[in-house]
Image: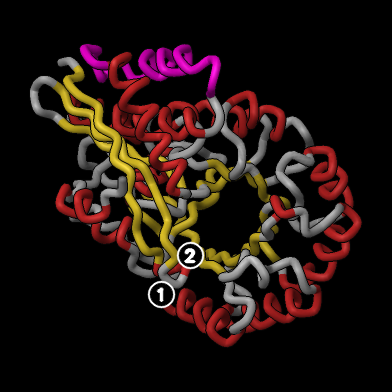
Amino acid sequence: MRIKSIEAIPLAYPEPHYKGMERYITLARVETDGGLVGWGECISQFPEAALATAVIIEEGYAPLLNGEDPRDVERLWSKMLAHIWWYGPEGIAAFGVSAVDMALWDLRGKALGLPVADLLGGRLMESAVAMGSIIFDMEDLDWTVNEFRWMREQGYRVVKGGWGMRPEAVFGQDRERDIETVRLIREAIGDELELVVDVPGARGLWDVPTAIHRFRDLEPYRLRWIEQPLPPWDLEGHARLRSAVTTPIGTGEDEWGLESYGRLVRSGGVDVVQLDPGRCLGITGSRQVVSLIEAENLRFSAHTWSGALNTAASVHLLVGSPAAVCMDFKPHESPMQHELVSDPWEQVDGHLAVRSRPGLGVEVREEAVEKYRFS
């Protein structure tokens, strides 16, 4: 079995969870000489990043991997990383590695007749906790609170919200409004559900003293964690914050690989690490980071909020680790979740069951790929 071709496909789609705002992912399609196809995805997010990722995959990785045995996933992953030593393995190059690596795991599972979870060492659980995740509308609190009430009715056990629909109105900017938002949400979902709030920390809204006060303001509402309270690069600030508060800290969505995550988990400033196989060097890279998280006795959540392939990869990673908490999941229908594949993911009692079908366990609809292709 040999790789015959590798194609990169940027997709643009309207995101209902962002009131129709256009977002971008890039797919990798890997085909063998026998006609077997594996699919992967990265969350390239912006139009220029999606296009640049496609160039790197098709002009950098495809010539490197064509003719190789796709079942040698870890070796091919290392080969890609060795190739990008000058311009990676962070940023655009990492997006490309993530998508191709995910496609190779899908292909390997299909070739061997096994789901990816079994290839990764087996399952500790048969399902992953789905955290219903939305964007706050900080200018329409009735709508926001009703969304959380609806998620409770749908059976979610963990729910999350944050940021805002406009840059000028996001969570973290207005202390009184933030407190009122969380108070109303907790009132709507009751005491049984776990609640996470997400601050646009990369924008530097809070310094450490402010973050300490805000964490203490929100203590009465029993948050499972507060996500990205500070700029992600401020590891020392996260450690100071963690030593001063009781609510757990979540961060990590902006990291890339083992070295980057290593600095984070050893910083003493995080409780729940966020990682995304569609960003941090694919399933192979995520697997390495999960081992590091386990060794440091921390927990992790899959920060996956893009398409059905990334959801699949996250489920397979989560069910095999004792450090897994949950994964972000879009509660409403979305093109990349419900049109991209013929068998969309559906949560049941707040869980996503791992599928026993070979590979990632989802079937890509190529007509949907063509519908949303972006160039």
- Residue 124 appears in view: no
Question: Which amino acid type corresponds to the residue marked 2 in the rendered image?
Answer: Gly
Q: Please say if 337 is above or below 168.
A: above
Return the x and y of residue 268 as percentages of the image width and height. Answer: 79, 37
Q: Nearer the viewer, residue 178 or 83?
A: 83
Question: Which amino acid type corresponds to the residue marked 1 in the rendered image?
Answer: Gln
Q: Distance between the residues labelled 1 and 2?
A: 10 Å
Rendered residue at 78%/73% (across/down): 174
Element type at marker 2? strand
Rendered residue at 31%/26% (across/down): 58
Residue 132, numbered circle: 2
Element type at marker 1? loop
- Residue 94 counted in the magenta span: no
Residue reaching furthest to the bottom = 142
Indicate left or right for 31 with 290 as reference. Answer: left
Return the x and y of residue 25 as percentages of the image width and height. Answer: 38, 47
Sooner in the amino-acid sequence: mark 1 or mark 2:
2
Residue reaching furthest to the left = 34
- Residue 281 appears in view: yes
Q: Please say if 100 is above or below 134.
A: above
Q: Which of 268 and 263 is in front in this view?
A: 263
Indicate left or right for 88 with 226 as reference. Answer: left
Span colored in magenta: 66-88
Q: Please say if 140 is above or below 109.
A: below
Q: Picture quarter containing residue 75?
A: top left
Task: Tell me whether circle 1 and circle 2 mark residues in contact (CB < 8 Å).
Answer: yes
